[in-house]
Amino acid sequence: MRVLNLGCGSKTSSRCINIDWSPYLRVKKNKLLRVLVAPFLNEERRHRLIMLSDNVMAWNLRKGIPFPDESVDAVYHSHILEHIDRKDVASFQKEIYRVLKSGGTQRICVPNLEALARDYLSSLERCRVDETALDHHDNCIAEMIEQCVRREPFGTQHQPPVRRYLENLILGDARKRGETHQWMYDECNLKFILRQAGFHGIAIRRFNESNIPDWQSFGLEVDEEGNEYKPGSLYVDCMK
């Protein structure tokens, strides 16, 4: 069974073809870059680079998916779709549809806008009757919009000033690095996108259930203790 794990980051599976295009992966795959970049990495980042799995294909998905038509049984991606420009989402879905075999499954995991909105409204109601709840209210707002509006890349905020300046100069801000959310999804707009791409059998799932046979053994949606890896996510299966 051939399963693609697109934009895998550090969450890989030996049962998948893992594909990513992170700066860390590109450095690891290029000997010259490793030599040039290593002096600028702090201990935490060097450890992150070393711990990257060798079982990852370095590929820029903006160029499409590097597999023939109808050649894979399933495609999985987690917290990737929201980082894609809205104008490019349709073409991304068409690429997934193209490489899937007839009857194949696309498995999607994205931040759940509905859940975030409900948490925000609950926090708002608490604040109206209990001013002490205000201390945590901004956290609910941040969960919804911080990833959409921030400019500073997550990894540079606590760097020494010179290193921080050089890194931002070379790699760009959070949006240029692809860290920001370009859109948010709930079950309604996600289903619409999938139908437009030609998928059917669209179903909302739990993190531990899927059309993909023996899904739990892939270990992509659980942490080391077997708990949900991305709580509060929206999980969707659909079929070609």
Image (tube, grey):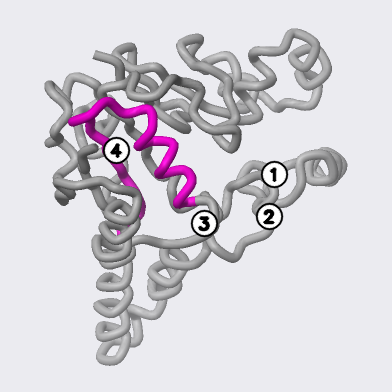
Q: Amino acid at mark 4?
A: Tyr
Vertical arrangement, residue 48 with respect to residue 92, above or below: above
Q: Considering only order in the chain, which callout, 3 or 4, is on the residue closer to the N terminus?
A: 3
Residue that carries the numbered disc 3 in the rendered image: 181
The 10 Å Cα crowd at callout 1, few under 14, some 14 to 19, many 20 or more, is some
Q: Is residue 28 left or right of residue 111?
A: right
Q: Considering only order in the chain, which callout, 3 or 1, is on the residue closer to the N terminus?
A: 1
Name the image quarter holding the N terminus: top left
Q: Which of the two marks, 1 or 4, is nearer to us in this view? A: 4
Q: Amino acid at mark 3?
A: His
Q: Considering only order in the chain, which callout, 4 or 2, is on the residue closer to the N terminus?
A: 2
Q: Considering only order in the chain, which callout, 4 or 1, is on the residue closer to the N terminus?
A: 1
From the top left corner, tell me how far across and down residue 152 is, in percent: 68, 55
CA gap, disc 1 to disc 3? 18 Å
Residue that appears at 21% across and 43% down: 238
From the top left corner, tell me how far across and down residue 167 is, in percent: 79, 39
CA gap, disc 1 to disc 2? 7 Å
Residue that carries the numbered disc 2 in the rendered image: 152
Pointers 4 and 3 in contact (C-beta within 8 Å) = no
Q: Amino acid at mark 2?
A: Glu
Name the image quarter holding the C terminus: top left
Q: Secondary structure at mark 3?
A: loop
Pointers 1 and 2 in contact (C-beta within 8 Å) = yes
Specify the segment rendered in magenta: 89-112
Q: Secondary structure at mark 4?
A: loop
CA gap, disc 1 to disc 4? 24 Å
Residue that carries the numbered disc 1 in the rendered image: 156
Q: Is residue 21 left or right of residue 195?
A: right
Residue that appears at 45% across and 73% down: 138
